Image: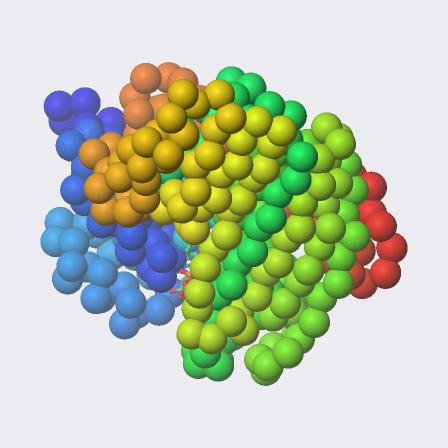
Amino acid sequence: MLKNNRLGYGVLGLGVGMAHAEAAFSSENADLVALCDINNDRLSDAAEAFPGAAAYNNFDDMLADPRIDIISVCLPSGMHADYVVKALRAGKHVLCEKPIDISLEAAERIEAARLETGLRCGICMQNRNNINMRPIKEAIDSGRMGKLLFGTFAVKWFRPAGYFSSTPWRGTWAMDGGGSLINQSIHTVDLMQWLMGDVESVTSKMALFEHDIETEDFTASLISFKSGATATFISTTCAYPGLATEICVYGTDGSIEADADRLLTWRMKDSPDYEAEEKAMLKKYGQGNSLSTVPVGHVSMVEDIIAAVRDGRDPQILPTEGMKSLRIIRAIYDSAKTGKQIML
Ligand SMILES: NC(=O)c1ccc[n+]([C@@H]2O[C@H](COP(=O)([O-])OP(=O)(O)OC[C@H]3O[C@@H](n4cnc5c(N)ncnc54)[C@H](O)[C@@H]3O)[C@@H](O)[C@H]2O)c1
């Protein structure tokens, strides 16, 4: 703890870690005190952008900095558990980037270390805080949508060849744990299970259409939920030039459609004037996070772990919550590889 009850924040890995650094730097409740990367160009750029933060090119040196209370771990996905566990055992609270790691065994190691140390550990799944998600979740959980029948989810993104060639861990089974599904689409897998409930089984196919990588750039799945509902899920990095993130849920008493953080359709059977209600909802939630008055994106996750440490509460997304999307993703890959339906 620093002066004035402010927490000391460190960031490990300075790709998307720069968004964590920016959020900690701008926080009213923490100071960005340390940055770490083995890439010296990235490290010096970050040190220039965030004056006052110490720059380390070795994680052990960063861990020894007594001013640090919280570390954001923003390394390649297959490195998460090793570094999160090390940070927790060194007495630091942790915000871990998504996915929690690439295997459930690694994810379990994070949860075991959290329980063993009693420290705070959150997983960065910021899309649950998109401005349109609260009303959608409330409409479902309150029963207003009736019984959920089906959902359609599709992450129709595009990544050029250079995205993979510039960063060798991406698109590898060993470090990315897969392709378009685990890397680009995990947030939408998470939202699917968060909105529609526990998954019972998956039947999937995958393909590698046009990238020079070892994993996939397309998956298609039929998802069965324990509730009896069904969903389709598409992930791809081949939809030129990058199109929608479709999040659509249909119940006996209502239909909701969204594209990422923007609400597109809001039709409720119990509404006295469903057109007026939809118009009002689209005015409020149809333009995405730009109109948000509450923290969204990485700021929401960084502020959440800071508040969790300060107030002695759990962070918003515990490791057990981060495992839910990973379990579905691993089942999708198993199904696509074996050609069998996989029960969860
Ligand atoms: N939440 C989100 O929306 C979001 C967005 C992008 C990436 N991510 C996740 O964040 C993680 C990082 O992705 P990225 O795109 O920033 O990758 P990246 O390759 O651009 O950045 C990773 C950084 O880690 C550094 N690094 C590697 N090994 C290190 C070590 N031993 N010590 C210190 N630094 C080391 C690398 O030099 C690199 O700068 C991935 O798990 C990815 O899935 C999440």
Q: Position of residue 102 (x, y in %)?
A: 62, 52
Residue 25 visible to the viewer: yes
Of 230 and 4, which appears nearest the observer?
Answer: 230
- The image quarter containing residue 218 is bottom right
In percent of width and height, residue 27 lies at 19, 37
Dividing the image into 4 quarters, which one contains the C terminus? top right
- State the image quarter where residue 199 is shown: top right
Instruction: Provide residue 249's location: percent of width, then percent of height.
Output: 56, 39
Residue in the foreground of this view, choosing between 11 and 164: 164
- Along the horizontal axis of the image, is 341 left or right of 77? right
Residue located at (23% from left, 46% from top): 290
Nearer-the-camera pick, 93 or 232:
232
Q: Ligand 1 sits in which quadrant?
A: bottom left
When asked about the image quadrant of residue 307, the answer is top left
Residue shown at 15% from the left, 32% from the top: 28
Question: Taking 318 as reference, is 211 above or below it?
Answer: below
Pick the front one: 38 or 25: 25
**Residue drawn at 36 percent across, 46 percent down:** 262
